Amino acid sequence: MIKVPFSPPYLHPEVLDAVREVLESGWITTGKKTKELEEKLREYTCAKKVLCLNSATAGMELMLRWWGVGPGDEVIIPAYTYCATANVVMHCGAKPVMADIRPGDFTISPEEIEKKITPRTKAIITVDLGGMPCDYREIMEILKAKKHLFQPRNENQENLGRILLMADAAHSLGAVYLGKPAVFYTDVSVYSFHAVKNLTTAEGGAIALNLPDNFSHEEIYRFLYAFSLHGQSKDALAKLQLNAWEYDVTEAGFKCNMPDLLAAIGLIGIKDYEKVLAERKKVFDFYTAFLSQYKEMELPVYENNEKISSYHLYLLRIKGIRRAERDRIIENISLRGIAVNVHYKPLPLLSFYQNEGYSMADYPVSADCFEREITLPVFYGITGEQMKKVVDSLILSIS
């Protein structure tokens, strides 16, 4: 039987040599390799500054804390996302305010954002679900129009003078919006390099800063870097220099830096990342060409006149079914040796957020999309035979 995994990591053969080099160097924590990866990512994304960390989750929380989000504040997020987007808001003591998504491409609805903004709103975390950028120009226009409602509480907020726009770009490294890297249209984007992501460091993430020019991105970088090391004024490498052990702690920070051992994996991956995206696009195009002949298939939008996805998740929906039928289809596909998935269980369906008072009834588009969604396997190296097996198994499982 031909078997198809869901999303095995893409690791170039050079990764083994790169990791071995770091191991043999005697320096495996944050050092020169991590700084090199930050620079490569800055060049690739056209961001003003990039900081690598141990996860995208850590990156989002560090940014919220730098921004000053705390008790009494609200942060608007989509109801249709992974729990990390909401959890970081809860960690800061603020309230996640959930908004529904657009049915076309699973991105947060600007119209719903506009309805949710209050004087307590301090930030919006959009989610480029599956790699498709949100409608950033439209969202930014709303934020500028609502500036009169914004009530700054610190110097950073006063300098920006409006709600912070942060993208949970965990899926969307390489995505394009209006002809440029999507990060260009946000204040900050946070990427994930988890094992299943298009670019992986096994575990990891990065903050890409693109605030207005009245902010010192170098100064913000230094603050965030220290904050990722318990607020320590020097990292381990700096402290090893001659008579340089002395350090200070200026903030009660976190421990979420990226080590060189993981950065070495990312440095190999970023070299041929465009090739990876091109191969993933071929998988998307194959599925779309084959499934377009079936009227019950609602195919994902991954390109239009304004946006190009990073081809991370193929978010298929099947018309006219509900959750029980969807789950039966998934079981039948799985019995044929095909690994499929569902992205994601909306936040109001999770016990924690139900207990916080959120209800799925308030987010009808998210509810409908979830009940009909099946994510098909996409990975570098999938064969034509495997892709044909996926679509054949899908059709057999539906009929």
Image (cartoon, rainbow, N blue to C red):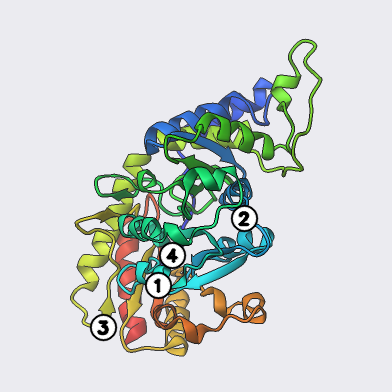
Q: In which quarter of the image is residue 45?
A: top left
Quadrant location of the C terminus in the rendered image = bottom left
Which residue is label 4 attached to?
A: 3
Answer left or right for 277 relative to 116.
left
Which residue is label 1 attached to?
A: 112
CA gap, disc 4 to disc 3?
A: 25 Å
Closer to us: 42 or 70: 70
Mark 4, Cα crowd under 10 Å, few <14 / some 14-19 / many 20+, is few
CA gap, disc 3 to disc 1?
A: 28 Å
Closer to us: 104 or 158: 158
- Foreground disc of the pair 4, 3: 3
Mark 3, Cα crowd under 10 Å, few <14 / some 14-19 / many 20+, is some
Q: Do the residues labelled 4 and 2 touch (CB within 8 Å)?
A: no
Residue type at mark 2?
A: Val
Q: Do the residues labelled 4 and 3 touch (CB within 8 Å)?
A: no
Answer left or right for 78 relative to 255.
left
Mark 1, Cα crowd under 10 Å, few <14 / some 14-19 / many 20+, is some
Quadrant location of the N terminus in the rendered image = bottom left
Q: Which of marks 1 and 2 is nearer the N terminus?
A: 2
User: Residue, x 25% and y 61% (percent of image)?
Assistant: 286
* SS category of the residue bearing label 4: loop
Residue type at mark 1?
A: Glu
CA gap, disc 4 to disc 2?
A: 47 Å
Which residue is label 2 attached to?
A: 69
Q: Quadrant of residue 94?
A: bottom right
Which residue is label 3 attached to?
A: 296
CA gap, disc 1 to disc 4?
A: 42 Å
